[in-house]
Amino acid sequence: DIQMTQSPSSLSASVGDRVTITCRASQGIRNDLGWYQQKPGKAPKRLIYAASSLQSGVPSRFSGSGFGTEFTLTISSLQPEDFATYYCLQHNTYPWTFGQGTKVEIK
Amino acid sequence: QVQLVESGGGVVQPGRSLRLSCAASGFTFSNFGMHWVRQAPGKGLEWVAVIWYDGSKKYSADSVRGRFTISRDNSKNTLYLQMNSLRAEDTAVYYCARQGSGDYDFDYWGQGTLVTVSS
């Protein structure tokens, strides 16, 4: 199985901060990676697909990059509504696997 | 608009069975692969199973293989998850999710249904 190592597991940041979350795949997955945001009690919501394509309706402060084994989600200027947990997902090979999640909290 | 509505969750004793349903609307169900994803209380997301748009292929996680069966009825626009021999560690919110076209990942999710396995 492909392991997705996501870091950090949590972070504290202030409104307006630039935030970066990383996912590393245990083997190459091309750009078969998505990023999801989840708020408590809600279903996940896709932010980024194909590693760097912005999901329709998602604010442009979210961006993704990477190919192969190293991927990054960046929030350019953190907003109050962005405090949530973020997950990466590889869909290159079954079983699909998620990263462990990154909880973004208010500093 | 795309809607996915899960049902069938509840409290069940270890070793018993439960069947989850996911009713789809707002799109041509028979054109899309469908998945189940679960999330244990306070934990991360775990992919469970997939079924091809026409039901021709299925894959499942090692943790559920041989106990859970994914199926679909395209005439009813409904996805199913038959869960047998349930264990305490199967306690989770179960989400159905649509696989986006173009070989992508999940573009729409249901709201989830809670399954609690407890005596």
Image: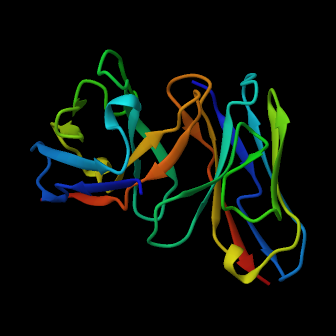
From this view, report whether residue B23 is shown above or below residue A90: below
B3 lies left or right of A4: left
Q: Quadrant of the N terminus of chain B?
A: bottom left
How many numbered circles does the render carry?
A: 0
Name the foreground residue: A76 vs A84. A76
Q: Determine the residue positioned at 52% across, 54% down.
A: B44
Q: Determine the residue positioned at 72% across, 28% down.
A: A26
From this view, report whether residue B86 is shown above or below residue A91: below
Residue B82 point in image, percent of width and height: 18, 37
Residue B22 point in image, percent of width and height: 26, 48
Q: Is residue B118 visible?
A: no
From this view, report whether residue A95 is shown above or below residue B100: above
Name the foreground residue: A83 vs B30. B30
Image coloring type: rainbow
Residue A60 point in image, percent of width and height: 81, 62
Q: Determine the residue positioned at 32% across, 30% down.
A: B30
Q: Is residue A44 visible?
A: yes
Residue A88 point in image, percent of width and height: 66, 46
Q: Determine the residue positioned at 47% across, 44% down.
A: B46
Q: Quadrant of the C terminus of chain B?
A: bottom left
Name the foreground residue: B79 vs B64. B79
Q: Quadrant of residue A34?
A: top right
A98 lies left or right of B63: right
